[in-house]
Image: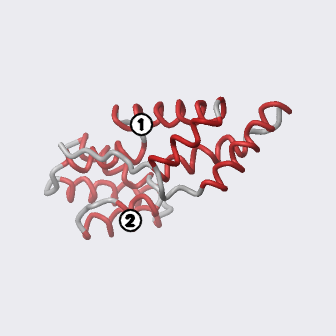
């Protein structure tokens, strides 16, 4: 029962955009959104208990898998993150890597990727804040679909 309540707390801590992307019962979604709006400690505590009660009627395994995928705790999500970081490093080190990447991802914006790579290289060379470096990662992550597992 406490684990279900902890799962409910994790749902409450999610941003609303991520909560909207999750496949959960409407009553549970409404209770979580209401808990986000409650400011008083006692009111929030009681709402979390209510969420825990609603969680008893929900299979927690798929919910936990969705939550782990969104928050990056799953092993598959961690592996995906490492793959994307390696790809970013490869793209920054070798111009031919971009050609190979574009041949596999026809929907990618070639000019936008070139600009990000060039700017990221310049940032590294000049020791500036890694804005383009991070943006390149975000673009690569958007181009590769997330891995969501259901248990």
Count residues near mark 2 (Cα–Cα under 10 Å), then give few for <14, some for 14-19, many for 20+.
few
Question: What numbered label is drawn on residue 20?
Answer: 2
Q: Residue at x 79, y 37 (%)?
A: 123
Would you place residue 61 above or below residue 34 in this image? above
x, y percent for residue 28: 27, 64
Q: Which quarter of the figure is the C terminus placed in?
A: top left
Q: Quadrant of residue 54?
A: bottom left
Count residues near mark 1 (Cα–Cα under 10 Å), then give few for <14, some for 14-19, many for 20+.
some
- Element on which disc 2 rests: helix
Residue at numbered disc 1: 80
Question: What numbered label is drawn on residue 66?
Answer: none
For marks 2 and 1 on the same chain, the one whose residue lies earlier in the sequence:
2
Horizontal arrangement in the rendering, residue 88 relative to residue 29 (left or right):
right
Would you place residue 49 above or below residue 3 in this image? below
Q: Nearer the viewer, residue 42 or 21?
A: 21
x, y percent for residue 84: 50, 37
């Amino acid at each position: 029962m406490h684990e279900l309540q902890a799962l409910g707390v994790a749902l409450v801590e999610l941003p609303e955009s991520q909560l909207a992307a999750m496949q959960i019962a409407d009553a549970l979604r409404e209770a979580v959104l209401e808990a986000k709006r409650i400011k008083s400690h006692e009111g929030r505590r009681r709402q979390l208990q209510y969420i825990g009660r609603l969680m008893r009627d929900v299979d927690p395994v798929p919910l936990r898998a969705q939550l782990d995928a969104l928050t990056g705790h799953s092993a598959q999500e961690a592996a995906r993150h490492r793959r994307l970081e390696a790809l970013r490093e490869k793209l920054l080190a070798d111009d031919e890597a971009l050609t190979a990447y574009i041949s596999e991802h026809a929907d990618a914006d070639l000019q936008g990727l070139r600009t990000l790579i060039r700017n990221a290289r310049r940032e590294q060379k000049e020791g500036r804040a890694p804005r383009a470096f991070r943006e390149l990662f975000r673009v690569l992550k958007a181009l590769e679909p997330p891995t969501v597992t259901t248990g």
